Image (spheres, rainbow, N blue to C red):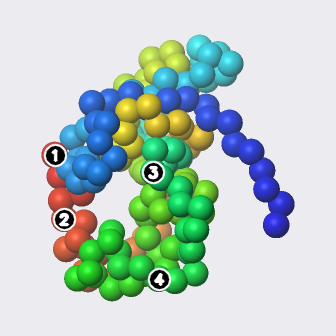
Amino acid sequence: MRSFEITPIGTVRNDRTDIQNTDNWGAVRSTITVDERFGEDCLTGLEGFSHVEVLFLFDRFPTAADDDFREPRPYRGRADLPPMGVFAGRGPRRPNRIGVTCCAIESVEGRELTVVGLDAVSGTPVVDLKPAMAEFRPGEIGQPEWVSDMMSEYFKP
Protein backbone atom coordinates (compact mmCIF):
# COMPACT_ATOMS: atom_id res chain seq x y z
CA MET A 1 0.00 0.00 0.00
CA ARG A 2 1.04 3.54 -0.63
CA SER A 3 1.98 5.58 2.43
CA PHE A 4 1.37 9.27 2.92
CA GLU A 5 2.34 12.06 5.25
CA ILE A 6 -0.03 14.19 7.33
CA THR A 7 0.92 17.64 8.58
CA PRO A 8 -1.06 18.83 11.61
CA ILE A 9 -3.25 21.90 11.12
CA GLY A 10 -3.28 22.90 14.77
CA THR A 11 -2.77 21.95 18.40
CA VAL A 12 -5.02 21.18 21.38
CA ARG A 13 -4.64 23.10 24.65
CA ASN A 14 -6.49 22.07 27.82
CA ASP A 15 -5.80 21.03 31.41
CA ARG A 16 -5.49 17.29 30.67
CA THR A 17 -1.95 15.92 30.32
CA ASP A 18 -2.16 12.33 31.60
CA ILE A 19 -2.78 9.88 28.73
CA GLN A 20 -3.67 7.19 31.28
CA ASN A 21 -6.56 9.27 32.69
CA THR A 22 -9.11 8.09 30.15
CA ASP A 23 -12.53 8.95 31.61
CA ASN A 24 -14.51 12.07 32.48
CA TRP A 25 -14.01 14.07 29.27
CA GLY A 26 -17.52 15.55 29.19
CA ALA A 27 -16.68 18.91 30.76
CA VAL A 28 -13.15 19.23 29.37
CA ARG A 29 -12.82 22.58 27.59
CA SER A 30 -10.15 22.62 24.90
CA THR A 31 -8.88 25.36 22.64
CA ILE A 32 -7.60 24.31 19.25
CA THR A 33 -5.25 26.86 17.75
CA VAL A 34 -5.06 26.50 13.99
CA ASP A 35 -1.67 27.15 12.41
CA GLU A 36 -1.13 30.67 11.10
CA ARG A 37 -0.50 29.36 7.56
CA PHE A 38 -4.31 29.07 7.22
CA GLY A 39 -4.92 32.75 7.99
CA GLU A 40 -7.16 34.51 10.51
CA ASP A 41 -10.38 33.66 8.63
CA CYS A 42 -9.86 29.89 8.34
CA LEU A 43 -12.65 29.11 10.84
CA THR A 44 -15.16 31.62 9.44
CA GLY A 45 -18.60 30.02 9.22
CA LEU A 46 -17.89 27.32 11.79
CA GLU A 47 -19.64 29.43 14.46
CA GLY A 48 -22.96 28.58 12.77
CA PHE A 49 -22.58 24.90 13.71
CA SER A 50 -23.22 23.38 17.12
CA HIS A 51 -20.60 20.63 16.81
CA VAL A 52 -17.33 19.89 15.04
CA GLU A 53 -15.58 16.63 14.31
CA VAL A 54 -11.96 16.86 15.43
CA LEU A 55 -9.44 14.48 13.87
CA PHE A 56 -6.26 14.21 15.89
CA LEU A 57 -3.19 12.07 16.45
CA PHE A 58 -2.57 9.89 19.49
CA ASP A 59 1.03 11.07 19.35
CA ARG A 60 1.89 10.32 23.00
CA PHE A 61 0.72 6.73 22.93
CA PRO A 62 3.77 4.46 22.78
CA THR A 63 4.36 2.60 19.55
CA ALA A 64 5.73 -0.89 19.99
CA ALA A 65 8.01 -2.17 17.24
CA ASP A 66 6.38 -5.58 17.57
CA ASP A 67 2.78 -4.29 17.66
CA ASP A 68 0.67 -6.99 16.06
CA PHE A 69 -2.81 -5.82 15.10
CA ARG A 70 -3.91 -9.23 13.79
CA GLU A 71 -5.05 -10.63 17.12
CA PRO A 72 -8.13 -9.27 18.91
CA ARG A 73 -7.40 -7.94 22.40
CA PRO A 74 -9.68 -7.31 25.38
CA TYR A 75 -11.26 -3.87 24.99
CA ARG A 76 -9.37 -1.18 26.94
CA GLY A 77 -7.08 -3.96 28.18
CA ARG A 78 -9.79 -5.19 30.54
CA ALA A 79 -10.03 -8.97 30.95
CA ASP A 80 -13.75 -8.65 31.79
CA LEU A 81 -14.49 -7.29 28.29
CA PRO A 82 -14.54 -9.30 25.07
CA PRO A 83 -11.61 -9.33 22.64
CA MET A 84 -12.06 -6.89 19.78
CA GLY A 85 -10.20 -6.45 16.51
CA VAL A 86 -8.17 -3.28 16.05
CA PHE A 87 -10.90 -1.62 13.94
CA ALA A 88 -13.71 -2.44 16.38
CA GLY A 89 -12.45 0.03 18.97
CA ARG A 90 -11.79 3.76 19.22
CA GLY A 91 -8.70 3.74 21.45
CA PRO A 92 -5.18 4.93 20.69
CA ARG A 93 -3.73 1.49 19.82
CA ARG A 94 -4.26 1.88 16.10
CA PRO A 95 -2.13 1.49 12.97
CA ASN A 96 -2.15 5.25 12.18
CA ARG A 97 -2.88 6.60 15.67
CA ILE A 98 -5.79 8.74 14.39
CA GLY A 99 -8.55 9.73 16.80
CA VAL A 100 -11.85 11.45 16.03
CA THR A 101 -14.37 13.05 18.38
CA CYS A 102 -17.51 15.05 17.74
CA CYS A 103 -17.37 18.03 20.14
CA ALA A 104 -19.69 20.88 21.07
CA ILE A 105 -18.47 24.23 19.78
CA GLU A 106 -18.25 26.85 22.52
CA SER A 107 -16.62 29.67 20.58
CA VAL A 108 -14.81 30.58 17.39
CA GLU A 109 -12.42 33.52 17.38
CA GLY A 110 -9.83 34.03 14.67
CA ARG A 111 -7.73 30.89 14.53
CA GLU A 112 -8.95 29.67 17.94
CA LEU A 113 -11.75 27.15 18.28
CA THR A 114 -12.94 26.30 21.80
CA VAL A 115 -14.77 23.00 22.17
CA VAL A 116 -16.19 20.92 25.00
CA GLY A 117 -15.78 17.15 25.26
CA LEU A 118 -12.63 16.60 23.21
CA ASP A 119 -10.84 13.51 24.52
CA ALA A 120 -7.32 14.61 23.59
CA VAL A 121 -4.61 15.75 25.98
CA SER A 122 -2.94 19.14 25.82
CA GLY A 123 -0.38 19.39 23.03
CA THR A 124 -2.14 16.86 20.81
CA PRO A 125 -1.74 17.59 17.09
CA VAL A 126 -4.99 18.18 15.20
CA VAL A 127 -5.01 16.93 11.60
CA ASP A 128 -8.43 18.19 10.46
CA LEU A 129 -11.70 19.80 11.52
CA LYS A 130 -15.09 19.10 9.94
CA PRO A 131 -18.42 20.66 10.90
CA ALA A 132 -20.89 18.05 12.15
CA MET A 133 -23.88 17.92 9.82
CA ALA A 134 -27.11 16.04 10.48
CA GLU A 135 -27.06 14.54 7.00
CA PHE A 136 -23.80 12.71 7.78
CA ARG A 137 -25.04 11.21 11.06
CA PRO A 138 -26.76 7.81 11.11
CA GLY A 139 -30.37 7.76 12.29
CA GLU A 140 -29.80 4.93 14.75
CA ILE A 141 -26.59 3.41 16.05
CA GLY A 142 -26.43 -0.20 17.20
CA GLN A 143 -23.72 -1.46 19.52
CA PRO A 144 -23.16 -4.30 21.99
CA GLU A 145 -24.82 -3.68 25.37
CA TRP A 146 -21.52 -3.91 27.28
CA VAL A 147 -20.19 -0.86 25.39
CA SER A 148 -22.72 1.48 27.02
CA ASP A 149 -21.82 0.13 30.46
CA MET A 150 -18.09 0.42 29.82
CA MET A 151 -18.35 3.95 28.40
CA SER A 152 -20.71 5.26 31.11
CA GLU A 153 -17.98 7.39 32.74
CA TYR A 154 -16.14 8.44 29.57
CA PHE A 155 -17.96 11.70 28.84
CA LYS A 156 -19.15 12.43 32.39
CA PRO A 157 -17.92 15.77 33.73
Tag shown at residue 72 = 4
Q: CA distance from mark 3 to mark 2?
A: 23 Å
Closer mark to the observer between disc 4 and disc 2: 4
Q: Which residue is mark 1?
A: 157
Q: Position of residue 30 (x, y in %)?
A: 35, 32
The mark that comes first in sequence, 1 or 3, is 3
Label 2 secondary element: loop
Q: Which residue is mark 3?
A: 61
Q: Residues within 10 Å of mark 4 (few under 14, many from 20)?
A: some
**Residue type at the position of mark 4:** Pro
Q: CA distance from mark 1 to mark 3?
A: 23 Å
Q: Is residue 93 above or below residue 132?
A: below
**Residue type at the position of mark 3:** Phe
The mark that comes first in sequence, 4 or 1, is 4
Q: Are marks 4 and 1 in contact (CB under 8 Å)?
A: no
**Residue type at the position of mark 1:** Pro
Location of the N terminus (image quadrant): bottom right
Q: Give me the residue at 33% from left, 69% from top.
A: 76
The mark that comes first in sequence, 4 or 2, is 4
The answer to which quarter of the image holds residue 109 is top left
Q: Is residue 45 above or below residue 116?
A: above
Q: Give me the residue at 57% from left, 74% from top.
A: 68
Q: Give me the residue at 59% from left, 41% from top.
A: 128
**Residue type at the position of mark 2:** Ser
Q: CA distance from mark 4 to mark 1?
A: 31 Å
Q: CA distance from mark 2 to mark 1?
A: 11 Å
Closer mark to the observer between disc 1 and disc 3: 3
Q: Which residue is mark 2?
A: 152
